[in-house]
Amino acid sequence: MKKSYKKIIVVFIILLIILSLIVIIALINLNKGKKVISDSDFINYMEEHGYEVNDVTNKSKKNDDLVKSYTAIDNKTNLQVTYHELSDEKRAKTFYDNYISIFFVPTDKSSSNENINKNNYSKYILSTNDKYICISRVDNTIIYAQVESKDKDTIKTIFDDFSY
């Protein structure tokens, strides 16, 4: 009888160790930040989806912290998505906060906004009757779009595809 209790205890301890490892791995994965997309990832994706991508880094060089800047335009719909890479995460956070301060609109019954800040990631969404604004930062990169409300699903898809 004592042997069967020992077997049960050993099996229980092994199961407890396995369960603990699963929980630890899950917690580690939850705390990982989002993956940064490179400028070439942005360019390739946008061109594959019919956008014309322009390097606007020199036009945007008012900010010395800006490393790269691209604007993707769909010539059929005039939708525009912008990609910025800044010199470091701190400067990207400041750049992101400045964008939000420009576009922040107090919500009323016909508008809503959402602000998310986690790990290496920030996202701000403003949705009104006539416009949709989304700006997302991962580490030192920012993707931004401002469109008419009717086009928000297209922009949501782009941001989701980038995991931004």
Image (spheres, helix red, strand yellow):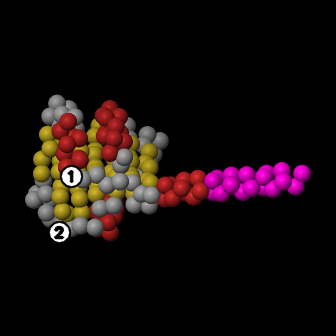
Q: Secondary structure at mark 2?
A: loop
Comparing 18 with 43, the one in front is: 18
Question: Identity of the amino acid at label 1?
Answer: Asp
Indicate whether 158 appears above or below 86.
above
Is residue 104 at all visible to an observer of this figure?
no
**Residue 14 counted in the magenta span:** yes
Q: Is residue 100 left or right of residue 51?
A: right
Point out which mark residue 39 bears.
1
Q: Are marks 2 and 1 in contact (CB under 8 Å)?
A: no
By secondary structure, the bulk of the magenta-drawn segment is best described as helix
What residue do we see at 14% from left, 40% from top?
A: 52
Give the extent of the magenta segment: 1-20
Could you tell me residue 164's position as x and y percent? 35, 49
Label 2: how many residues lie within 10 Å, few (<14), some (14-19) or many (20+)? Answer: few
Is residue 33 at all visible to an observer of this figure?
yes
* Mark in front: 2 vs 1: 1
Label 1: how many residues lie within 10 Å, few (<14), some (14-19) or many (20+)? Answer: some
Q: Secondary structure at mark 1?
A: helix
The total number of labels drawn is: 2
What residue do we see at 59% from left, 56% from top?
A: 21
Q: Which residue is mark 2?
A: 64
What residue do we see at 17% from left, 68% from top?
A: 64
